[in-house]
Image (cartoon, helix red, strand yellow):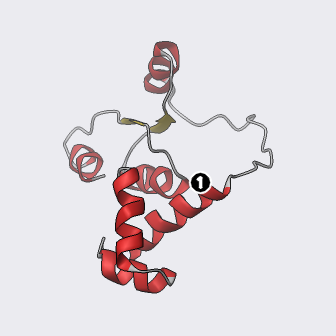
Amino acid sequence: MECVQALAGMDPAPRIVVLTGFASIATAVEAIKLGAAHYLAKPATTSEIEAAFAREAGDPSVEVTARRTSLRTQEWETIQSTLRDCDFNISEAARRMGMHRRTLARKLAKRQIG
């Protein structure tokens, strides 16, 4: 996210497309707020990546569908959101989520913070 913010601050700002293997709603929203033009989750094909750089605006014809989110994904998004709210203080985030700090640390060790 710091890289997105730094690139967006350049004059002229480059076109930024975020490609991540640890996608979440929280990081997608933050990336766009910080200046990314598009946000793609892995795996993405080269044509999808090229299309993201070529597109000037969003596509309003994209159908909005209800998405079933797994419990694991919901937990991960809650962890990321809480960590961001606590400035990535693991002890404070664990306290806010009602879990032991070591439990949160183990969960974070399994996945990278994104």
Residue 37, position as x, y percentages in the image: 44, 39
Does residue 81 sit above or below 93 in this rendering? above
Mark 1 nearby-residue class (10 Å; few <14, some 14–19, many ≥20): some
Residue ID at (29%, 46%): 4
Does residue 88 sit above or below 108 in this rendering? below
Q: Name the residue that disc number 1 marks.
A: 73
Helix, strand or loop under label 1:
helix
The answer to whether residue 114 is left or right of residue 47 is left
Residue 56 can be seen in this image: yes
Residue ID at (47%, 67%): 79
Does residue 52 sit above or below 110 in this rendering? above
Residue ID at (78%, 44%): 64
Tell me the quarter of the picture where residue 93 sits: bottom left
Residue 57, position as x, y percentages in the image: 55, 35
The answer to whether residue 2 is left or right of residue 58 is left
Which residue is farthest top?
47
Residue ID at (45%, 50%): 32
Relative depth, front residue between 29 and 104: 104
> Count of labels shown?
1
Residue 46, position as x, y percentages in the image: 46, 14
Tell me the quarter of the picture where residue 19 sits: top left
Residue 114 can be seen in this image: no
Q: Say what amino acid the circle numbered 1 marks.
A: Thr
Residue 90, position as x, y percentages in the image: 32, 74
Does residue 30 sit above or below 8 in this rendering? below
